[in-house]
Structure formats: C-alpha cells, structure tokens
Image: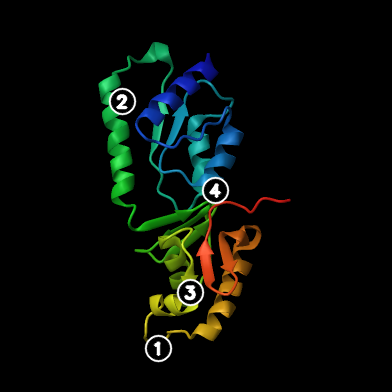
C-alpha cells in the first residue's frame, strides 16, 4: 500500500542518517516543505490527486530562494529497484548538501546563506540590514550558545558599520520584529546576551 511504501522508504533513508519528513498527500507535502525547507524532495507518481510536475511548480512558488533537487519515484510495475544504485544516489545528495553546509545555516524555518547574503523564513525572503544579517549569522553559527553583546559587536566588524554594545538591543528588536511569529528564535538571556533557539518555548 501507499503508506507501507512510504514507511519503508522513510526507514531506509533514516538508515543513511537522513532526517525525513513525510506527507500523505500533496497539500500536506507543500505545507511541510515550506516549513522545514528540505534539501531534497521525493515525489511518488500515481499516488496523489495532483500531478507531480504541478507539485514541483507549487514548491518553487513556496520556496523561491531554494534550489531543490527533485526525485520522481515511479510505480513499482514501471521500474526495477537497484538498492545499491539508490543508496549511492541518496549518499551523493546528502554529500552535496553537506558540502554546502558551511555556507547555509538553518535554525527551524530560518535559513541564512552566508555566501549570497540572503536570509529566508519559511521560504520568504527577509529584508535585513547588513548589521542585522551579521548579528543573526553570528547567533546561528552556534545555536543554543549565549553570545554577549560585546561578542556580537566584535562579530559585526570594526568598520564604518560597526555597532556599539548599547545599540545591539535595538538591532535585535528589529530582527525579532521581522521574524514575526518566529521571534522566539532569538532569545534573550537576561544579564548576559542573546542566543538562537530552534524550538518554541513550552507554554505552561
């Protein structure tokens, strides 16, 4: 059945140290892709009410800044599975993603491309100033680690756009405003500084 094939594929990918997010239909898949910004998308033909090519077009709209590779999985009767070839393909994709890992930072739905100076939230581009970009990059380099205001100033450089400790809070406030419902990604550690977190605080 469809669910059995999906679960089998999920387990095989996990064995290759891949983090897998599965969806039972196209609408759910597009929503999840927009939320987690995956490195690769697998589409199985013939098991959805949507044309896989149409799903690809929708993903391009939802994730305009991403260059996602797509793999089309054909129905069992139309192909023979070569397990070794499949494993090699997945490893190649994972290796490619890891090779670019130093340039792209991710914290939940927030992604930063340090080479292209581009920040996206759930696929939507964030309009950050250079200083805001540098601050957010520094926080995302070490998620969970608390950065003092002095350290954040140092990370922004000692050029004409360098900031002072007393203005860090102003820039952080602006970043949080632009993050909207995801402002929790930048957490204040009272009396110390700030850190980046990838999960929303639990509500008591």
Q: Mark 2 points at which residue?
A: 86
* Residue name at image x 60 percent, y 35 percent: 28
Mark with earlier residue (4, 3)? 4
Q: Mark 4 points at which residue?
A: 62
Label 3 to label 2: alpha-carbon separation: 46 Å
Q: Where is residue 53 in the image (x, y as percent from the top left)?
A: 48, 34
* Residue name at image x 56 percent, y 64 percent: 186
Q: For mark 3, give the secondary structure.
A: strand
User: Vertical placement of 164 versus 129: above or below?
Assistant: below
* Residue name at image x 40 percent, y 88 percent: 160
* Residue name at image x 50 percent, y 41 percent: 57
Q: For mark 1, give the secondary structure.
A: loop
How busy is the neighbourhood of tag 2: few (under 14 within 10 Å), some, or many (20 plus)?
few
Q: Mark 1 points at which residue?
A: 160
Label 1 to label 3: alpha-carbon separation: 21 Å
Labels 3, 2: front one: 3
From the viewer's side, name the closer residue of 40 and 46.
40
Q: Where is residue 191 in the image (x, y as percent from the top left)?
A: 58, 75
Label 1 to label 2: alpha-carbon separation: 52 Å
Query: Which numbered circle lies on residue 82?
Result: none
Label 4 to label 3: alpha-carbon separation: 35 Å
Label 1 to label 4: alpha-carbon separation: 37 Å
Mark with earlier residue (1, 4)? 4
Q: Position of residue 77 (x, y in %)?
A: 40, 11
From the viewer's side, name the closer residue of 83 and 75.
83
Mark with earlier residue (4, 2)? 4
Most extreme residue toward the top is 77
Q: Name the residue under label 3.
A: 148
């Amino acid at each position: 059945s469809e669910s059995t094939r999906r679960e089998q594929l999920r387990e095989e990918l996990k064995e290759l140290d891949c983090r897998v997010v599965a969806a039972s239909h196209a609408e759910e898949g597009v929503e999840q892709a927009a939320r987690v910004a995956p490195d690769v998308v697998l589409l199985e033909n013939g098991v959805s009410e949507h044309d896989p090519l149409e799903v690809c077009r929708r993903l391009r709209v939802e994730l305009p800044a991403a260059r996602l590779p797509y793999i089309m999985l054909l129905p069992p009767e139309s192909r023979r599975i070569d397990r070794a070839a499949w494993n090699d393909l997945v490893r190649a994709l994972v290796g490619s993603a890891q090779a670019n890992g130093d340039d792209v930072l991710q914290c939940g739905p927030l992604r930063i491309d340090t080479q292209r100076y581009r920040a996206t939230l759930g696929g939507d581009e964030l309009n950050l100033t250079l200083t805001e970009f540098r601050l957010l990059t520094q926080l995302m380099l070490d998620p969970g680690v608390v950065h003092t205001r002095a350290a954040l100033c140092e990370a922004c450089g000692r050029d004409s756009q360098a900031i002072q400790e007393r203005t860090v809070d102003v820039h952080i406030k602006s970043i949080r405003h632009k993050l909207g419902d995801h402002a929790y990604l930048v957490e204040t550690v009272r009396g110390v500084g700030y850190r980046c977190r990838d999960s929303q605080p639990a509500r008591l």
